[in-house]
């Protein structure tokens, strides 16, 4: 088949990808959008496999079959609560693939250059054939692209591995840094650029420099994400998502493949926007999230007076039986306790009793953008009663009962009242304005950010201690 | 140590500083308790009862002062009593150091340590010894009882066979401890209660007691009467005007008016003027709890009950707590014993007068031949400072338009600057980069642009699926690996094959997971 046909297939694939992302603007159209994405990907792969530039397609098909089966199995088995870890793990694969492709480009380049220098008229096929016809200026640009692809890919790889470890609890979620902190990162970055310059100048064996660069980038990715606390993981995951896109785009330049460029740019900008939205929802600057830890505190946080008053299931059930409108605020704790099915059952029962039940989702609830929506959807909570913060925040004063399940910082009134609080200015769900608030919580500890929550001490708040799933399950039979 | 309670020498004072029950507690602290003969008689505690609680009864005041290390009283000590005291002795009572400078000087001269129960700081820890509050509580309750006693009708509303009884309308001015107690008592008698206070933050407390808060409306925000330490501060003239106008409007409707407005260290503000009294219905009752400080009502005569020409009864008693001497003594006795508990940290009957302690320091007005009043501000703020709440001002149409125009201009400027900067950058790159690169670069820039436009529209709830699908799509990098895998070099083939493997895990995994997620979203 001719180049023209492959390119045409790429154009169609690019359009399909754009439609696929655009289709995510609504739940219903999203179901169609996914098929656009699958079709685009299939088309691109098939067109490449049978296109003129393809190489060892037999090996490729075997590899795709193995990888595809593995991916299929993982996706089938994964729990919805493990989604953040899965996404992070997948990013790491893209990053590492980008590093390998970058290495390959250099190996091929070296081979082609050697042949050219020796004046051999070998008839290179595939990628090497493309390289054969490049001018010196083009080769320089190519080297920059390889450098960027390898560097970003490597950062994405180790960063995602660490993010995966933190999200799955295999690595301690607390921010950790080596003694020199960011100076170390800056040093590694400077060294990487120095090696990049040497690589560009053609000084010594190129592949060596690339490996050194990749090593430094591996270190940066690891160290950078280690220094970021677990609560900031939504931003980190979307940032890594963005990086994996940019890495793909850089490789696309290297290979002169427009589809790679388009797709990489789409993914890159998508991740960038998600990171921006997450940061905004936490009222943090992107830079301060990436540099890790909460920003400097302006002064001592206000002391909280009063005490946390506990309540048992009977009390909560009585209040729910009396209530007309109920709002449920889920958080990461619900995901940890796997309580979404119980919550869904509770919702069903309350709705059957003619009560208005709604869910309030904070943009950073959970460990991944939209984490709660996915969990609730899994438990078959209808999505039209699941509302965003802005949609529901004004309704709290007219709400009879709010049940907070395993969330803490996103319902912390200190963000509004206490200018010295580390989360001051962060938009929060104003649950304390409701007539009564029940907080389902495992114990008296603080949340992920380690900040005391004055909500728990308010007069209209009662603490419903215990595992979220057990607590909610205890409630269900008590409702009439 | 010996704690002694004197018989109150003040005319008509029926309370006593130590009761049989508080004496028992004091003995547990290791103290010995003595009282003057007949000290508790008027509060209903006989000498015999005291003796049963292990208290020694001494016949005269002089003997008691001679024996005791700590003299407990209700009213401030008289000059004669102070003169009998010796250096190092302690007297605990109400003292009002601001009004009793000579007495303070005398205490200093005698070397007597004077602890003023009225100076106990208003912090949470000291609530149990806050005698002002416990007495105010009694005064508020008693005020309602006095009012009811002088009111010829029911407090509660009833519909009976013999006719309908309207509920009494009660206005409580000043919602401090006494005011709130009065509200509580009136509400439980069945009256309709309205209450006013210059501190807007107590509206919630008033409403929690079952009364209606009387709001004042202002065109502009004014300084309200809230001050530090939970007490009221003098209000501005215009605020006062508003307040009086509101009272004038309420006066004809009210059956009972209970005024409790006091400002620390000042005469009571006049809030219920002659014309308001004249506007009231015959048979109405005014109870002025501020009578001792001149009264909130213009016509109040301290310590007297008077009836005006139009038949309004004005009660100006200043001894409401003393009128409930048994209860008042019980509570005051407890306040005293709590204070002594703090003074006796080791419970060994030895008093350690720790001047570092906020509460002890605050209440001690004379110590060791020195006047220690006024105390330095306590280290703990009485009430957490209220953060000023910013109110968003409603913008007029013009202002809004102007703001919009400014925002629009700013945005235009930003966009133009971005475009110019971006364009210049592109041109610069174009100068050095080869043509083949530029053609790809255009595609890249356009794709970023499209990406930004498209992603902004993605529904918030679909961010996780978005992440998963972009993750799958970013595996497009497989194309690069596919192209390279056919190369002649073995290394390249191996690396390429691995890259294909990883990317295809991602493609299948990513799409499948996204599908699983999307399939779950369903409408109700």
Image (tube, rainbow, N blue to C red):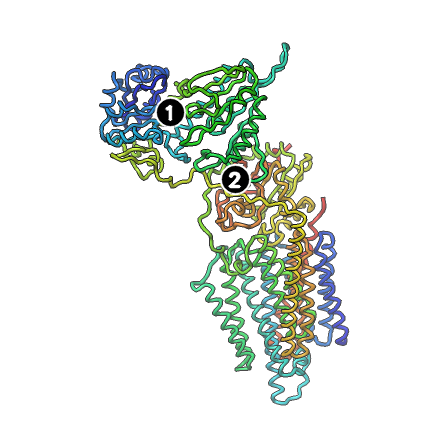
* Label 1 environment density (alpha carbons within 10 Å; few <14, some 14–19, many ≥20): many
Q: Residue A438 in the image: state x and y as whole percent.
A: 56, 38
Q: CA distance from mark 2 to mark 1?
A: 40 Å
Q: Is residue B513 visible?
A: no
Asked which quadrant contains residue A253, the reply is bottom right
Q: Is residue A178 left or right of residue A415?
A: left
On screen, residue B201 above or below B397 = above
On screen, residue A191 above or below B298 = below
* Quadrant housing the N terminus of chain A: bottom right
Same-chain status of marks 2 and 1: no
Q: Residue B144 in the image: state x and y as whole percent.
A: 49, 20
Task: Return the residue nearer the eye: B162 or A427.
Answer: B162
Task: Return the residue nearer the eye: A235 or B374.
Answer: B374
Q: Chain of mark 1?
A: B
Say which mark, if any, is on residue B332. Answer: 1
Q: Residue B447 in the image: state x and y as whole percent.
A: 69, 66
Say which mark, if any, is on residue B75. Answer: none
Say which mark, if any, is on residue A465. Answer: 2
Q: Is residue B58 left or right of residue A200?
A: left
Asked which quadrant contains residue B106, the reply is top left
Q: Secondary structure at mark 2?
A: strand
């Amino acid at each position: 088949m001719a180049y023209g046909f492959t390119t045409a297939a790429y154009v169609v694939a690019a359009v399909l990808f754009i439609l696929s992302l655009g289709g995510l603007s609504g739940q219903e159209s999203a179901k169609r959008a996914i098929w656009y994405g699958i079709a685009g990907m299939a088309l691109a792969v098939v067109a490449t496999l049978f296109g003129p530039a393809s190489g060892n397609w037999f090996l490729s098909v075997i590899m795709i079959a193995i990888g595809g089966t593995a991916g299929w199995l993982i996706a089938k088995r994964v729990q919805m609560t493990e989604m953040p870890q899965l996404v992070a793990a997948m990013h790491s694969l893209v990053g590492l693939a980008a590093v390998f492709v970058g290495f390959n480009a250099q190996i091929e380049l070296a081979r082609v250059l050697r042949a050219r220098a020796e004046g051999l008229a070998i008839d290179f096929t595939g990628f090497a054939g493309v390289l054969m016809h490049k001018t010196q200026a083009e080769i320089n640009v190519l080297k920059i692209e390889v450098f960027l692809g390898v560097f970003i890919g490597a950062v994405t790889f180790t960063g995602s591995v660490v993010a995966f470890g933190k999200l799955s609890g295999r690595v301690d979620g607390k921010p950790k840094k080596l003694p020199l902190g960011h100076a170390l990162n800056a040093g590694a970055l400077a060294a990487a650029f120095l090696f990049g310059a040497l690589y560009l100048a053609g000084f010594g064996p190129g592949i060596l420099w690339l490996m050194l660069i990749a090593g430094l980038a591996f270190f940066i990715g690891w160290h950078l994400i280690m220094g970021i606390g677990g609560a900031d993981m939504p931003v980190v995951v979307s940032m890594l998502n963005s990086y994996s896109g940019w890495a793909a785009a850089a490789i696309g330049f290297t290979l002169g493949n427009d589809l790679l460029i388009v797709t990489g740019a789409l993914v890159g900008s998508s991740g960038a926007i998600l990171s921006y939205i997450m940061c905004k929802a936490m009222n943090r600057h992107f830079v301060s999230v990436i540099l890790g830890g909460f920003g400097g505190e302006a002064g001592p946080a206000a002391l909280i007076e009063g005490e946390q008053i506990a309540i048992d299931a009977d009390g909560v059930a009585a209040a729910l039986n009396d209530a007309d409108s109920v709002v449920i605020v889920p958080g990461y704790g619900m995901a940890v306790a796997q309580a979404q099915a119980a919550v869904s059952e509770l919702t069903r029962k309350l709705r059957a009793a003619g009560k208005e039940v709604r869910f309030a989702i904070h943009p950073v609830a959970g460990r991944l953008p939209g984490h709660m929506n996915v969990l609730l959807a899994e438990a078959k909570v209808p999505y039209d009663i699941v509302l965003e913060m802005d949609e529901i925040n004004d309704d709290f004063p007219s709400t009879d009962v709010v049940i907070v399940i395993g969330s803490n910082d996103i319902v912390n009134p200190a963000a509004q009242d206490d200018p010295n609080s580390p989360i001051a200015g962060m938009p929060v769900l104003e649950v304390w304005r409701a007539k009564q608030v029940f907080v389902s919580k495992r114990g008296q500890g603080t949340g992920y950010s380690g900040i005391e929550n004055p909500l728990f001490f308010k007069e209209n708040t009662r603490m419903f201690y215990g595992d979220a799933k057990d607590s909610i399950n205890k409630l269900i039979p008590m409702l009439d | 140590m010996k704690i002694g309670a004197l018989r109150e020498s003040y005319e008509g004072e029926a309370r006593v500083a130590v009761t049989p029950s508080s004496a028992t507690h004091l003995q547990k602290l290791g103290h010995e308790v003595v009282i003057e003969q007949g000290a508790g008689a008027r509060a209903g505690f006989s000498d015999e009862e005291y003796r049963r609680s292990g208290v020694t009864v001494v016949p005269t005041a002089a003997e008691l002062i001679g024996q005791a290390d700590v003299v407990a009283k209700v009213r401030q000590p008289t000059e004669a009593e102070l003169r009998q005291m010796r250096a190092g002795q302690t007297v605990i009572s109400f003292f009002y150091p601001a009004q009793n400078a000579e007495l303070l000087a005398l205490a200093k001269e005698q070397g007597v340590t004077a602890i003023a129960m009225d100076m106990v700081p208003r912090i949470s820890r000291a609530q149990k010894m806050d005698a002002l509050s416990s007495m105010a509580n009694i005064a508020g309750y008693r005020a309602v009882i006095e009012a009811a006693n002088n009111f010829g009708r029911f407090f509660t509303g009833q519909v009976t066979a013999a006719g309908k009884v309207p509920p009494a309308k009660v206005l409580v001015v000043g919602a401090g401890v006494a005011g709130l107690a009065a509200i509580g008592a009136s509400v439980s008698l069945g009256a309709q209660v309205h209450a006013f206070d210059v501190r807007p933050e107590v509206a919630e407390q008033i409403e929690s007691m079952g009364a209606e808060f009387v709001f004042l409306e202002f065109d502009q925000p004014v300084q309200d009467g809230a001050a530090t330490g939970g007490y009221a501060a003098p209000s501005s003239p215009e605020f006062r005007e508003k307040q009086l106008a509101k009272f004038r409007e309420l006066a004809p409707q009210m059956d009972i008016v209970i005024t409790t407005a006091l400002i620390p260290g000042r005469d009571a503000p006049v809030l219920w003027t002659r014309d308001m009294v004249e506007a009231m219905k015959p048979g109405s009752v005014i109870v002025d709890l501020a009578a001792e400080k001149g009264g909130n009502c213009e016509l109040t005569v301290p310590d007297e009950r008077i009836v005006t020409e139009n038949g309004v009864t004005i009660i100006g008693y200043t001894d409401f707590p003393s009128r409930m001497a048994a209860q008042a003594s019980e509570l005051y006795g407890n306040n005293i014993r709590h204070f002594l508990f703090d003074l006796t940290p080791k419970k060994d009957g030895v008093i350690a007068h720790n001047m570092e302690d906020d509460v002890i320091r605050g209440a001690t007005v004379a110590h060791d031949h020195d006047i220690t009043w006024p105390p330095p501000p306590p280290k703990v703020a009485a009430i957490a400072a209220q953060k000023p709440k910013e109110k968003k001002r409603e913008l007029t149409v013009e202002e809004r338009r102007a703001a919009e125009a400014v925002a629009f201009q700013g945005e235009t400027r930003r966009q133009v600057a971005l475009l110019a900067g971006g364009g210049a950058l592109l041109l610069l790159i174009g100068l050095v980069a080869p043509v083949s690169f530029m053609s790809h670069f255009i595609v890249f820039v356009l794709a970023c642009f499209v990406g930004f436009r498209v992603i902004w529209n993605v529904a918030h709830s679909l961010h996780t699926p978005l992440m998963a699908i972009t993750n799958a799509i970013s595996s497009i990098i497989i194309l690069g690996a596919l192209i390279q895998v056919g190369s002649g070099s073995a290394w390249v083939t191996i690396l390429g094959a691995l890259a294909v493997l990883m990317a295809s895990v991602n493609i299948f995994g990513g799409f499948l997971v996204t599908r699983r997620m999307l399939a779950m979203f369903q409408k109700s």
